[in-house]
Image: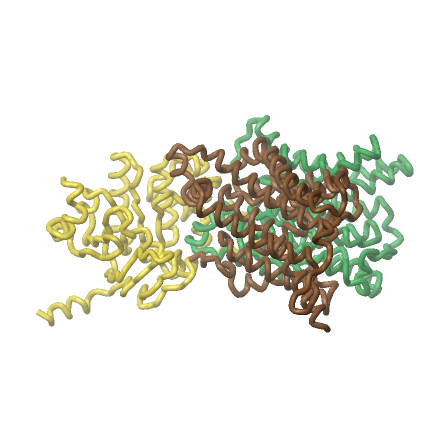
């Protein structure tokens, strides 16, 4: 049995490893002793009741917060304590729960700016951005992939909420990440928009073969597409397993699913 | 093109004004000052309008440029061309030092720290009597014979146009776009991989560089340099110019600066005593613009002619 | 250098620091509740000082009662001026972006500073200290200016008063609630707008009080407004935003620092606040008592 486990572990490469992570704000412990390992290429979900610390976890991974204790390893490199812009350059990208785009800029400019940054072309003082053909082609391609190519010059702040969230995802994609973190990608969307987004997420995962981790409240979505589900409750990891295992886990049902009986 | 027509008019202007003798000379001087101040205001707008950062100490770099020219030409006998080239370099250096401290903060902390550094530099120039002449300033700066009012105007105009085009190129480049996205959403900019502090610092230095050009030209125009050049009220003038003209357009600061200078002179001509209340008058205009027309004259124009405002 | 001289410098610095604390706490309070930095706060302080001067010319000089009248009348007058600014102006900008807020209060600074110049002219003024506070008192064999000691007593009293107001009264609780959860306070049926206006007036009251106290401590001129707002900022940067204790400590450090540097390098004493600010920004950007942003 042990041998079999070892063999399985040998073939899996963990892209993200978090050990004993703790985060406190002013004496309030928001994340306590979280351990998780995400294998490369996995599409998984993090669920948990409101206030469980899911977004804080994302913030810790991406460098927005400093861990109080614990380690975070991305591809065998310790990233705890690094600045967000350095972490992003290593290959982690995220989208946000509350839309976080560049409102006065056009949809296309949002993506163009991200592509330029990814290609490290920001210190170009000379060439007008409009003349950067390869950048524009790539930006258009990304917009096509997410379904926003029909309104490139619209001021992004004027887009419908759902489309703004999709643009947020597009920005994350433009960074060609190895690990993509999506924070409640369907929050605030109509049911139709929801399934479109879910469909998009699954298509992207299949096409790009990157590791994806998303936070979701909609259980249909979570059980519909994720390979693995991790449950966070009051800052601790309550359970981890396949969707089927989780839906049968008594602790989880008690803490969380009990409120949302299907 | 409107731009081409305007440039032609600007080139022809001094010759036209020269017909009017002493009065004409005065107006040539005024328009030269307008050109220089437009350059100063446009340089500030790189940080203010495009960078979204309020800098109250920009006059310090204007002053460093001014005193560089004054000191090099008066005390070291350097010729004008070299002095005018050294001015922006010294100003950029000052901006690098000041900026390094200031970009560690954001928003209003940044604003006050720039004010404090501006005052600091002002105070240093004021107190360092032996070097800078303190309160007296530096006078009698040499000026080449052939640069009479008309010719100096043309020199300033050419330098202005070159700087204007350079700054516009920078604004439209990838760097300019990066600066604008930092303004739009600083945190998100970090999350797409931009080292925000570094870019803000570079932007600050570039702005300081061009302010130094303006300072150098101004010193040569007046043939003196004074501590007043570094006073925070000069920084304030530039801020107003950007606001009144329109912070979010490239040509706004030029328009705002020229309008304000014109108003000032105009009031002076009407009645000497009106100049006494210029500061209050200016403050009221600023109040009005902030409350009712934050996009300035250019913004009003675009609203009236129905042009959509996309960055 | 004699111990008397040293003590004199120290006391002088401490009292300047106290006045600074009073003014800076007003600024801090306004920022905490309204989230607006009032650039013109220094101008209001200056107006307080000049109003004290004007009023003092109408009252018998040197009398303790005259001074008490000044302390009672001038700060509310400044608070009223603040009210006059808050209703038509500040209310309109609470929801606007920080850039515009800064520019608006900067415009106010210009208008108020120049109005002072027009009303009171460019001469240096001061208010005569009331006779009872004009001399020196003996302390451990050394003589200290009474007025400075007076301020050293008033300052902490004000600090305690503010603490008491914020932590032990219903109004204070409302203010502190408004700082952390403005929407919640509104939902509880409290007139949030009134809390904000009230806090703003309190901030102006403090600025005015600082002005009155300063008018008899040292000479006042048209530059003190600008000077004070920068010093207030140094206080907030060094002490850390949101900390009254930090504000007190940094005010004292700044007051004493400026005073002490007068000795060797009088010409550069005035740059001490900037120097201290720069130092803090290198070592601890979030101030002595603030919290790191990550």
Q: Position of residue B113 (x, y in %)?
A: 60, 54
Tell me, what colour scheme is on the image? by chain
| Picture residue at 64% right of the left edge, 52% below the top | B115
Which residue of the protein is positioned furthest toward the right in this rendering? Answer: B21
Whether residue A91 is situated above or below residue B152 in the rendered picture: below
Q: Residue furthest bottom?
A: C1
Q: Quadrant of the N terminus of chain C?
A: bottom right
- Front residue of A218 and C195: C195
Q: Which image quadrant for residue B300?
A: top right
Task: Using the rendered view, name the quadrant where residue C77 is placed.
Answer: top right
* Residue B214 in view here: no
Residue A257 lies, in percent from the top left, at: 16, 45
Q: Is residue C208 left or right of residue C249?
A: right
Drawing shade for chain C? brown
In the depicted structure, whether residue B224 falls above or below residue C172: below
Q: Residue B86 appears in which quarter of the rendering?
A: bottom right
Residue C72: x and y, percent? 63, 41
Q: Nearer the viewer, residue A169 or A137?
A: A169
Residue at 14% from the left image edge and 40% from the top image edge: A261
Colour of chain A, in one word, is: yellow
The extreme left residue here reads A1
What residue lies at 80% left-to-right and 40% top-to-bottom?
A: B30
Describe residue A148's horizontal placement relative to residue C141 as left or right: left
Image hue for chain B: green
Q: Is residue C106 left or right of residue C173?
A: right
In the rendered structure, the answer to whether residue C164 lies left or right of residue A4 reads right
Residue C71, percent from left and from top = 65, 44
- The reply to whether residue A2 is visible in this rendering is yes
Q: How many marks?
A: 0
Comparing B239 with B181, the one in front is B239
């Amino acid at each position: 049995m042990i041998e079999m486990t070892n063999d399985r572990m040998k073939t899996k490469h963990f892209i993200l490893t978090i050990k004993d992570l703790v985060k406190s704000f002013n004496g309030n412990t928001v994340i306590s002793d979280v351990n998780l390992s995400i294998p490369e290429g996995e599409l998984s979900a993090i669920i948990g009741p409101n206030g469980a610390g899911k977004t804080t976890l994302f913030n810790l991974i991406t460098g927005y917060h400093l861990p109080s204790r614990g380690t975070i390893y991305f591809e065998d490199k310790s990233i705890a304590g690094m600045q967000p812009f350095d972490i992003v350059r290593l290959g982690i990208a995220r989208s946000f729960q509350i839309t976080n785009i560049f409102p006065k800029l056009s949809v296309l400019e949002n993506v163009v700016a991200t592509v330029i940054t990814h290609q490290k072309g920001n210190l170009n003082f000379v060439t007008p951005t409009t003349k950067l053909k390869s950048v524009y082609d790539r930006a258009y391609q990304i917009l096509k992939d997410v379904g926003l190519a029909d309104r490139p010059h619209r001021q992004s702040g004027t887009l419908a909420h759902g489309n703004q969230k999709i643009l947020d995802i597009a920005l994350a994609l433009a960074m060609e990440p190895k690990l993509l973190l999506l924070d409640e990608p369907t929050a605030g969307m109509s049911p139709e928009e929801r399934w479109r987004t879910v469909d998009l997420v699954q298509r992207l995962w299949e096409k790009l073969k990157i590791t994806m981790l998303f936070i979701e409240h909609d259980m249909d979505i979570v059980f519909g597409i994720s390979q693995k589900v991790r449950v966070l409750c009051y800052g601790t990891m309550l359970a981890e397993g396949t969707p089927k295992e989780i839906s049968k886990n008594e602790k989880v049902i008690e803490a969380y699913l009990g409120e949302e009986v299907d | 093109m409107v731009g081409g027509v305007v440039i032609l008019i600007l080139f022809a202007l001094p010759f036209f004004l020269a017909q009017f003798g002493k009065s004409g000379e005065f107006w040539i001087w005024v328009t030269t000052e307008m050109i220089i101040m437009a350059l100063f205001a446009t340089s500030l707008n790189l940080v203010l309008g495009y960078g979204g950062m309020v800098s109250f100490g920009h006059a310090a770099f204007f002053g460093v440029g001014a005193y560089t020219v004054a000191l090099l030409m008066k005390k070291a006998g350097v010729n004008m061309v070299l002095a005018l080239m050294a001015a922006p370099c010294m100003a950029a250096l000052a901006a690098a030092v000041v900026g390094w401290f200031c970009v560690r903060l954001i928003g209003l902390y940044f604003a006050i720290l720039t004010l404090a550094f501006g005052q600091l530099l002002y105070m240093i120039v004021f107190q360092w009597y032996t070097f800078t002449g303190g309160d007296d300033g530096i006078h009698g700066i040499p000026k080449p014979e052939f640069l009479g009012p008309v010719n100096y105007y043309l020199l300033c105009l050419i330098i202005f146009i070159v700087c204007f085009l350079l700054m516009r190129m920078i604004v439209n480049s990838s760097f300019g776009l990066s600066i604008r996205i930092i303004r739009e959403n600083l945190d998100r900019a970090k999350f797409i991989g931009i080292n925000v502090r570094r870019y803000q610092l570079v932007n600050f230095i570039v702005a300081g560089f061009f302010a130094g050009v303006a300072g150098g030209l101004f010193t040569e125009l007046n043939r003196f340099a004074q501590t007043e050049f570094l006073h925070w009220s000069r920084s304030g003038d530039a801020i107003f110019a950007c606001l009144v003209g329109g912070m979010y357009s490239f040509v706004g600061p030029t328009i705002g600066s020229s309008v304000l200078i014109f108003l000032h002179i105009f009031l002076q001509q009407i009645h000497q005593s009106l100049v006494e209340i210029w500061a209050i008058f200016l403050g009221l205009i600023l109040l009005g613009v902030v409350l009712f027309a934050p996009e300035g004259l250019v913004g009003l124009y675009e609203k009236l002619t129905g042009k959509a405002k996309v960055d | 250098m004699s111990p008397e001289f040293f003590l004199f410098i120290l006391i002088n610095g401490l009292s300047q620091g106290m006045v600074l604390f009073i003014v800076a706490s007003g600024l801090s309070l306004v920022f905490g509740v309204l989230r607006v930095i009032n650039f013109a706060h220094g101008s209001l302080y200056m107006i307080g000082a000049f109003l004290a001067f004007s009023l003092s010319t109408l009252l018998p000089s040197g009398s303790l009662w005259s001074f008490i009248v000044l302390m009672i009348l001038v700060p509310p007058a400044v608070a009223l001026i603040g009210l006059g600014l808050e209703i038509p102006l500040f209310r309109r900008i609470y929801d606007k972006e920080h850039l515009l807020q800064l520019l608006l209060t900067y415009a106010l600074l210009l208008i108020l500073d120049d109005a002072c110049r027009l009303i009171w002219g460019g001469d240096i003024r001061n208010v005569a200290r009331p006779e009872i506070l004009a001399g020196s008192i003996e302390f451990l064999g050394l003589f200290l200016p009474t007025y400075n000691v007076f301020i050293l007593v008033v300052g902490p009293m004000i600090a305690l008063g503010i603490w008491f107001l914020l932590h032990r009264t219903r109004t204070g609780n409302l203010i502190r609630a408004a700082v952390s959860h403005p929407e919640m306070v509104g939902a509880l049926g409290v007139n949030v707008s009134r809390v904000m206006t009230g806090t703003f007036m309190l901030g102006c009251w403090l600025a005015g009080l600082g002005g009155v106290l300063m008018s008899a401590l040292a000479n006042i001129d048209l530059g003190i407004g600008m000077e004070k707002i920068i010093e207030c900022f140094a206080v907030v940067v060094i002490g850390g935003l949101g900390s009254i204790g930090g504000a007190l400590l940094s005010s004292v450090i700044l007051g004493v620092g400026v005073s002490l540097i007068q000795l060797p390098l009088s010409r550069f004493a005035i740059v001490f606040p900037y120097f201290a600010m720069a130092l803090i920004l290198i070592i601890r950007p979030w101030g002595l008592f603030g919290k790191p942003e990550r």
